C-alpha cells in the first residue's frame, strides 16, 4: 500500500533526512586508507544518536550495524567489520538511514579512496548523475516510470570506459528504490530500468516520498549474496557504485529530503544544463 504523507509528516521526514545528510557528509570526510568499516559505523552511530535520532538499519531484520558499507565489488548491504580495512584505490558505498519520531530518511553515497582508477571514477560519476536525472524527471502528475526511464536512458547514453573490449554498464535489477515513510521500505518499488512490459506505475502526487537508488556495475549486472546472508556482490568481481536520496514533490518540483541543501544546487545545475542543451 502506498503511503501519502501530510505536510507535517513530510516535515518530520525532512528532519530525518537532514540527520542522514549530515551524517553522510561526516562519513565522506572521514574515509581514509587504513580505517576499517567498523570505524565508519561508530562515527555514524555517534552522529545519528547525537542528533536524537535512531539508526534505521540497526536491528532491521537482524542487521547488526548502523550503516551498510560495501567495498569495490560489493554492491549493497555490506556489514561493517573491524577486519575490513579500507585501502587507497577502493570505492566504498555507504548507505545510511535515520528515524525521527517514527519517520525515516534513507540515502547513500559511494566514495573514492585515495588514488582511484579512472574507470572507477567514471562509474561513480555516471551512477550519481543518473540518480539526479531520475529525481529531476519526477513531477506532480507524472508517473513513476518517468524516474526509471530517465535513470536508465542516462546510463545507457554514457560511453563505457572499457567499450573497446566489449564492456557495458551493468544496471542492477534485483535491488531497487522504494517508497518510504513510517517504514523504511514501502510501496511502490522504484526501478532503475524500464522492462518491456513494465507498467507506468502510480501517479506522482504531493505527499508521496520515494528513495531512489541506482546501483551500477562496471561489468555484468549479475549479482550474488555472500554467506553472511546480507552482502550483495557482483558475480564477475567488477566494482559497483550506489547512490541514493529520499525525495518528495512540491509545486516547485523535487525536494530532496536527505540533501542538506534540499537538492537545490544539483537540480538547478541540471536544469540549466538541460535548458542550454
Image: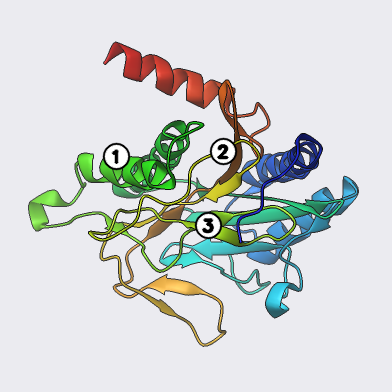
Callouts 2 and 3 close, C-beta under 8 Å: no
Comparing marks 2 and 3, which lies closer to the viewer? 2
Label 1, residues with CA under 10 Å away: few <14, some 14-19, many ≥20: some
Secondary structure type for disc 2: loop
The picture places residue 28, in percent across and down from the top left corner, at 62, 44
Callouts 1 and 2 close, C-beta under 8 Å: no
Horizontal arrangement in the rendering, residue 269 relative to residue 58 (left or right): left
Q: Residue at x 70, y 55 (%)?
A: 97
Q: Residue at x 40, y 35 (%)?
A: 133
Rendered-image quadrant of the C terminus: top left
The picture places residue 123, in percent across and down from the top left corner, at 34, 47
Instruction: Give the vertical position of 51 relative to 57 (above or below).
Output: above
The answer for how far apart the CA atoms under marks 3 and 1 are is 22 Å
- Which residue corresponds to mark 2? 205
Q: Which of disc 1 and disc 3 is earlier in sequence?
A: 1
Q: Which of disc 3 and disc 2 is earlier in sequence?
A: 3
Secondary structure type for disc 3: strand
In this orientation, which residue lies closer to the viewer: 87 or 66? Answer: 66
The answer for how far apart the CA atoms under marks 1 and 2 are is 24 Å
- Which residue corresponds to mark 1? 154
Amino acid at each position: 500500500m502506498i503511503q501519502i504523507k501530510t505536510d507535517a509528516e513530510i516535515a518530520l521526514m525532512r528532519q530525518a533526512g537532514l540527520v542522514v545528510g549530515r551524517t553522510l557528509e561526516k562519513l565522506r570526510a572521514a574515509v581514509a586508507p587504513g580505517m576499517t568499516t567498523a570505524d565508519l559505523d561508530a562515527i555514524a552511530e555517534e552522529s545519528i544518536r547525537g542528533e536524537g535520532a535512531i539508526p534505521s538499519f540497526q536491528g532491521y531484520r537482524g542487521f547488526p550495524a548502523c550503516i551498510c558499507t560495501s567495498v569495490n565489488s560489493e554492491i549493497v548491504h555490506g556489514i561493517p567489520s573491524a577486519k575490513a580495512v579500507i585501502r587507497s584505490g577502493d570505492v566504498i558505498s555507504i548507505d545510511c538511514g535515520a528515524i525521527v519520531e517514527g519517520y525515516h530518511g534513507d540515502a547513500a553515497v559511494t566514495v573514492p579512496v585515495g588514488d582511484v582508477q579512472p574507470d572507477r571514477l567514471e562509474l561513480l560519476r555516471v551512477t550519481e548523475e543518473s540518480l539526479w536525472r531520475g529525481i529531476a524527471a519526477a513531477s506532480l502528475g507524472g508517473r513513476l516510470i518517468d524516474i526509471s526511464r530517465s535513470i536508465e536512458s542516462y546510463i545507457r547514453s554514457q560511453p563505457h570506459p572499457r567499450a573497446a573490449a566489449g564492456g557495458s554498464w551493468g544496471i542492477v535489477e534485483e535491488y531497487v528504490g522504494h517508497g518510504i515513510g513510517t517504514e523504511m521500505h514501502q510501496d511502490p518499488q522504484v526501478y532503475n530500468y524500464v522492462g518491456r512490459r513494465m507498467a507506468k506505475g502510480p501517479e506522482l502526487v504531493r505527499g508521496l516520498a520515494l528513495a531512489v537508488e541506482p546501483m551500477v556495475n562496471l561489468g555484468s549486472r549479475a549479482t550474488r549474496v555472500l554467506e553472511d546472508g546480507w552482502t550483495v556482490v557482483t558475480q564477475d568481481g567488477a566494482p559497483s557504485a550506489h547512490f541514493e536520496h529520499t525525495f518528495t514533490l512540491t509545486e516547485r518540483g523535487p525536494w530532496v529530503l536527505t540533501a542538506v541543501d534540499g537538492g537545490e544546487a544539483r537540480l538547478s545545475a541540471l536544469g540549466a544544463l538541460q535548458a542550454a542543451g
